[in-house]
Image (spheres, rainbow, N blue to C red):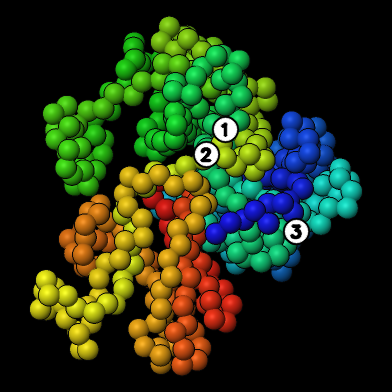
Amino acid sequence: MSNSNNNNAIRVVAAIDFGTTFSGFAYAHKSNPGNIIVHNKWPNFSGYYKIPTAVKYDESLNLTSWGYSALAVKPNKDIKSSDIKPAEKFKLHLSNMENKPPLPKGLHHETAITDYLREMGKIMKDAIKKSYQNIDFFKQVLIIMTIPAEFDIQAIDTMRECLLKAEIIDKKKSENLKFTTEPEAAAIHCMKILKELRIGVDSSYIVVDCGGGTVDLTTRKLMREFCRRVKFPFNGERDDFKPFDLDLDEYCPVIKQYVKGTELDQMEEVEWVIELKFEDALFLVGGFSESKYLQARVRKEYGQKIKNIRVPTNPMVAIVKGAVQYGLRQEVVATRVLKWTYGTDVARGWKSDDPVNRILPGGIVIEFSKLAVKGEIFPVDAGIQTVFTPGHIFQSEVGFDIYTTENENAKFCDSPGVKLLGNWSINIPITLSVRPILFIMSFGEIEIEAHAFNLETGDRYDNTFELDI
């Protein structure tokens, strides 16, 4: 499905970096993409690119302050009430971590997220209105929301709901809302420095995001690979960091059950040890990367192994500026190589070579119908189109359950290695006619978008599925 008409209406790209401890936003007009404005004027505070991710409520859980104001007054130790204590780090409640930070009694994390984003949204709308005249926010502003790479489809859906309630989007499935991961955005921002370093497209570089108490690593070549479990300590205890040997048998033994075929032979040959080499460039981003001590230590430990170690100007805003750049030029991440074969269950007439136990009443067999094959390369957001028709004229429900497998020759949805990705069904009116349904599936940055169109009535149905990248 093409979004060209929608893209033509966009005039401004605005990105929100919703962080665990600090957040901010930036925006730019498409007519002047080089002028990315990072907002730095907050209520009672100016000159700061980010504001604390904090909210404060009264006894009735009515929002009283947010950002710096929520942390300005320390709670009175003599008052034993949690309602005066600000809520912080509520973003972590969207993660799968076990010990989530406590919130004030009666406060749900979605309420805190919504209230915080609503207040930020008010300032963002006002800033855009003052910067550019006659902008229709809901029609002409593309919102880019950055999220952690480990967010699952449920967390993303929750963010959509919170953004809707915060009145930053006007409908949950708004085409004017895009997500990109935090490491992806930071990597895109650093790409412009590659030209200065004369590093070609076939070279690799690493982006180290120092902030939020962790060090997150992203490697870039033609596609991104986010190393979730690898956290390099910058303490100087190792004499030599080149290459870094990652023993999967020791650090992540569960991965062995998922490696098959030639990849299994290769990994067994090297005894489940892989080498990580980052020889071309290393970029430090995030708030802590502004530390002169950290920069000196990184250069001391890695300077002889990586010739280009750079810290972008204002590394704290690398993520939010990269997100704006992504929105302005979405072709930066142009293609997606599929890790799985995708398909759905389709009823067809039985064939002579079908197993007898597969034949259902009426001579029907339910097969695995391929939609996209593992290894195929698709442009990001490009749609795969297929037309389906109901099995009989009185059928009022059509299913589009999506399955994945490594085996591109799988015949049935319960064949070995075939897994259910998600269920989806739509209701259609009975008209006693053919009722063709156009099904479109596209592989986006962080999720699969599915759309079904009843070509007879014009009704549209939308859904999303998790994309394993």
Residue kind at label 3, given as amino acid type: Lys
**Going from the N terminus, do you reach mark 3 or mark 1 first?**
3
Q: Which residue lies at the image location 55% right of the left edge and 14% below the top edge?
A: 198
In the rendered view, tell whether residue 295 sits above or below residue 99.
above
**Going from the N terminus, do you reach mark 3 or mark 2 first?**
3
Q: Nearer the viewer, residue 415 or 351?
A: 351
Tell me the CA gap for discs 3 and 1: 26 Å
One can see residue 356 in this view = yes
Q: Secondary structure at mark 3?
A: helix
Read off the residue under disc 3: 139
Read off the residue under disc 2: 333
Task: Find out whether the residues at labels 2 and 1 contact each other: C-beta distance under 8 Å.
Answer: yes
Q: Which residue lies at the image location 13% right of the left edge and 29% below the top edge?
A: 269
Read off the residue under disc 1: 188
Q: Position of residue 463 (x, y in %)?
A: 50, 67
Task: Find out whether the residues at labels 3 and 2 contact each other: C-beta distance under 8 Å.
Answer: no
Residue kind at label 1, given as amino acid type: Ile
Q: Which residue lies at the image location 31% right of the left edge and 61% below the top edge?
A: 370
> Which numbered marker is on residue 108?
none
Disc 1 packing (10 Å; few <14; some 14–19; many ≥20) = many
